[in-house]
Image: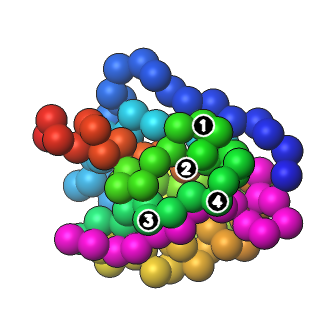
Amino acid sequence: SRVNVGRDTGPLRLRMGASDASAAPLADVIINVHKGQTGFGIYFIQRGGHVVVTKLDEGSEAQKAGVQPEDRLVSIQDNDKQLPVQNPGEEIVISQKNYHEALTLVRTMHHVRFSFLSNGMQAFL
């Protein structure tokens, strides 16, 4: 996999997905990741109405960018602008309703923008 990651260390930014105007999740860790031979190296679980990171592969792009277990996934976006089919490149805000579909979709993507709310920042909300 190619290492092309970035971590947004600036102030919290309001992120709103076009498909869910009522949602406005905060994201303080935003990374762009290319899929490697074994995937993205990020593992998730649905807990308490949120999708959280449970594990990261050692040396994965996400780990190198500072993603940590318990960070909350708030949105995904296909940087190749191929998915979702109905609106290619649209940011998908993760919700309790769509997380299965969103994670299934991300498995088919090759270059993804993941937006997270870090575990440390969650304590302040």
Q: Nearer the viewer, mark 1 or mark 4?
A: 4
- Image location (x, y in percent) of residue 28: 39, 34
Q: Is residue 45 above or below residue 111?
A: below
User: 79 left or right of 118?
Assistant: right
- Whether residue 84 appears in this view of the structure is no
Mark 2–mark 4 distance (CA, rounded to whole Å) = 16 Å
Mark 2–mark 1 distance (CA, rounded to whole Å) = 11 Å
Q: Considering only order in the chain, which callout, 1 or 2, is on the residue closer to the N terminus?
A: 1
What residue is pinned by disc 2?
114
The amino acid marked with disc number 2 is Phe
The amino acid marked with disc number 1 is Ala
Q: Tag 3: Cα neighbours inside 10 Å, few (<14), some, or many (≥20)? A: some
Using the rendered view, name the quadrant where residue 14 is placed.
Answer: top left
Q: Nearer the viewer, mark 3 or mark 2?
A: 3
Q: Tag 1: Cα neighbours inside 10 Å, few (<14), some, or many (≥20)? A: many
Residue at horizontal 46%, vertical 48%?
A: 68
Residue at horizontal 55%, vertical 30%?
A: 7
Disc 2 is placed on an element classified as strand
Q: Nearer the viewer, mark 2 or mark 1?
A: 1
The amino acid marked with disc number 3 is Thr
What residue is pinned by disc 4?
57
Q: Which residues are magenta?
A: 33-48
Relative depth, front residue between 58 and 118: 58
Q: Tag 2: Cα neighbours inside 10 Å, few (<14), some, or many (≥20)? A: many
- Image location (x, y in percent) of residue 98: 40, 75
Relative depth, front residue between 40 and 100: 40
Q: Are marks 4 and 3 in contact (CB under 8 Å)?
A: no
Residue at horizontal 35%, vertical 20%?
A: 11
